[in-house]
Image: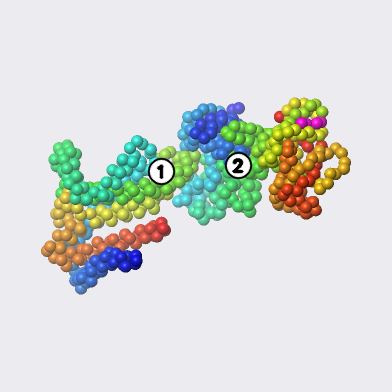
Amino acid sequence: MLVAPALVGLAFLVLPLVGLLVRAPWSTLGTRLGEPQVLEALRLSLVSATLATGLCLLLGVPLAWLLARVPFPGARLVRALVTVPLVLPPVVGGVALLLVLGRKGLVGGWLDAAFGITLPFTTAGVVLAETFVAMPFLVISVEGALRAADLRYEEAAATLGATRWTAFRRVTLPLVAPGVAAGAILCWARALGEFGATITFAGNFPGRTQTMPLAVYLALETDPQAAIVLSLVLLAVSVAVLAALRDRWVNAT
Amino acid sequence: MSGGLDARLVVRRAAFDLDVELAAAPGEVVALLGPNGAGKSTALRALAGLVPMAGGHVRVDGADLRALPPERRGIGMVFQDYLLFPHLSALDNVAFGLRCRGARKREARREAAGWLDRVGLAGHASARPRALSGGQAQRVALARALATRPGLLLLDEPLAALDAHTRLEIRAALRRHLEGFGGAAVLVTHDPLDAMVLADRLVVIEDGRLVQQGTPAEVARRPRTGYVARLVGLNLYRGRADGGTTVTVRAVQGEGSGGQGTSGVATMDTVDSLTGDVFLAFSPASVALYRTRPDGSARNLWRARVGSVERQGDRVRIQLEAPPFPAVAEVTPAAVAELELAEGTTIWAAVKATETHVYPA
C-alpha cells in the first residue's frame, strides 16, 4: 500500500536531477565552464558563501552558547526568533534587510551618514543576505551539540584552573567541533544556494552581486544551455556537501 | 589547625541538606563513606567549589577559599569517570592545568611528562584517552590533578569504574601515590575495603550528617550505626548495661536489621562490664547453629527461623529471624547441608559471651 507512493515520491525527487544530467551539453561542458561570466559568478558565490559562513560562525557560536548555557527570561522567544529566517520566504528577508540596512533604512541611513558605508547592491550586501538566511542552520546545530556536551568536562577544566573562557575555548569548543563543522557546512550550502534575499537586497550585477543561482536564473532566459551547466556545478557542490555530512548523518541513526 | 583542610560544609538542596565538618592534616587521607544519597559527592563538590555553599568555610592551609570560584581554589580533583579531555593526548591532559596556570607549552609538557612517568605511563604520552584502559585513564587523571600541586586533593570514587581484576593493582598504586602526596586528601567511596586500604581516617556520612569517624580499625571494630555495621560486616545492637556483664538489647540495627522483630527484649551475656547505653556487636562468623538445643553454658542461645540463605565466596550467609533478635550468621556450605538449612527452618543459634564486643553508645 505504501510502496507505490513511496516510489512515486522517490522518482519525483530523483527524475529532475536525472533530467539535468541527460540534457547537459557534455561535449561543450569544458569550454562553457571556462567562460568568464561563469567563472566570475562561481568565484563570487564561493567567496561570499565562505565569508557568510565565517560571519555566521563568529556571531552564531556565541548565540548558540547563550541559548544552550545561560538561562534567561524569554530564552524560548529568542530561540523562536533565531529560527524565523528558516521559515521566512527569503524574498521577505531581503525586503526586511533593505528596510533596515538600505540607504534610507533604520541602521543603513546612519551607516551612510556616519561612515559613508552603503550595503545594498554590493558584494557586502550579498554576504549579509546570505548570513541572514544561513545563520539559523549554524545556531541550531551548535546549540544542539552544546546541549549534548557533558558539562562536567567544564567542571574538570575549572578544577584545573581554567577560567570559563579558557574552558570554553580549550575544552567545550573542541568537544562540540563536529556539531560546529556540520552546522558550518549546512550554513555554507544554504548560503551558496541563496537566491531570494540576495536578489532583493543586493541586486543582480555581474561580478559584484551576481552569484551562481542568480546567473542560472538569468541564463535560463538568454542561454538555456549555460543555465544547465551552471546548475550542474551547483549540483556537484550539493553532492559534495552531502558526502561531507554523510558520516555524521549515518552515525546519528 | 593551620595546615591541611579544615572545613564546615553547609549545602541546602530541595531534597536534603548537608552539614558536616571535615578536617584533614597535610599528608592525611580521609575517606568519606556513606550510603547512596548521603551527600558524599555533594560534600566533595562543595569543597571543589562546584556547588554553592549555604554556609560554613573551606580552609586549605589556613586560607578560606569559600568565596573563590573553582578555578582559583587550587584544589585538585579526580572525577569518578576521570573526565579526561577526549580531544587531548594523555600528555596534554596532564599539561592542561599547568597551561592554565600560565606555563609555556614546552615547559608544561616537560613537567607533564615527568608526572606521566611517575604514574608509570611515560610510554602513553601521545595516546588519546579512548585508547587507554580504565586503570591507565585513572592514573592519567591522578597525574593531571597532582600536576597542579594542589594543597588539597579530592578523589570521587576513584576505583568505582574499574573491573575487579585491575582494581586490586590500581588500588595499591593509588595508595603509593597518595602516600607520596604531601597535601591533604579526601576520598569518596562506598566500598569499605577501598576506604580501609587507602585512608588514614574514615568519616561516615548519613543523610547529610556525620555519624561516625575514626581510624579504619576503630570504625571496623566499633560501628555506631546500622549502615557502618553492615559495611564492616558485624551484627550490631543497642542496649543497656547494668554494670555487670549482662546487656539488655532493646533495639536492633546492623546486619540483623531487616528481620521482622524489632520489639521485645532480649538479654545477652558478655564479658565487658559497662554501665548505661551501649552498643553490642558480634561477627556473623561467631554465630553457631544447631538443629537441636545444644548443651553447655557460657553461651547466648536463642531460637530462630532461617530467612534468606545466600552464598558469599566460600561462606554462606544466613538471615536469622528471631524476634526480638534478628542476626546474620555465616557458616560453611557443609554446615548448611548437614543442618539442612532452608528458608523457614527453625534452628538454635548460639554466640559465646567472649565473642561479643560491648562499647559505650
- Furthest toward the right, the residue is B296
Residue at 31%, 45% in the rendered image: A60
B22 over A68 or under it: above or below: above
Give the side of residue B281 with respect to residue A211, left or right. right
Count of residue discs? 2
Residue at 32%, 55% in the rendered image: A185
The residue that label 1 is drawn on is A168
Q: Which chain letter goes with mark 2?
A: B
The picture places residue B324, in percent across and down from the top left corner, at 73, 37
Residue at 20%, 58% in the rendered image: A213
Query: Mark 1: few, some, or many residues within 10 Å (few <14, many ≥20)?
Result: some
- Location of the N terminus of chain A by quadrant is bottom left
The residue that label 2 is drawn on is B189
A54 over B34 or under it: above or below: below
Give the side of residue B241 with respect to residue B178, left or right. right
Seen from the viewer's position, the closer of residues B41 and B13 is: B13
The picture places residue B63, in percent across and down from the top left corner, at 53, 28
Whether residue A160 is visible to the viewer of this picture, yes or no, is yes
Give the side of residue B160 with respect to residue A133, left or right. right
Whether residue A17 is visible to the viewer of this picture, yes or no, is no
Q: Which residues are magenta?
A: B245-249
The picture places residue B42, in percent across and down from the top left corner, at 53, 37
- Location of the C terminus of chain A by quadrant is bottom left
Seen from the viewer's position, the closer of residues B134 and B213 is: B213
Residue at mark 1 to residue at mark 2: CA–CA distance:
30 Å
Amino acid tagged 2: Thr
- Please, what secondary structure does the residue beneath circle 2 have? strand
Q: Are marks 1 and 2 in contact (CB under 8 Å)?
A: no
- Please, what secondary structure does the residue beneath circle 1 have? helix
The picture places residue B146, in percent across and down from the top left corner, at 55, 42
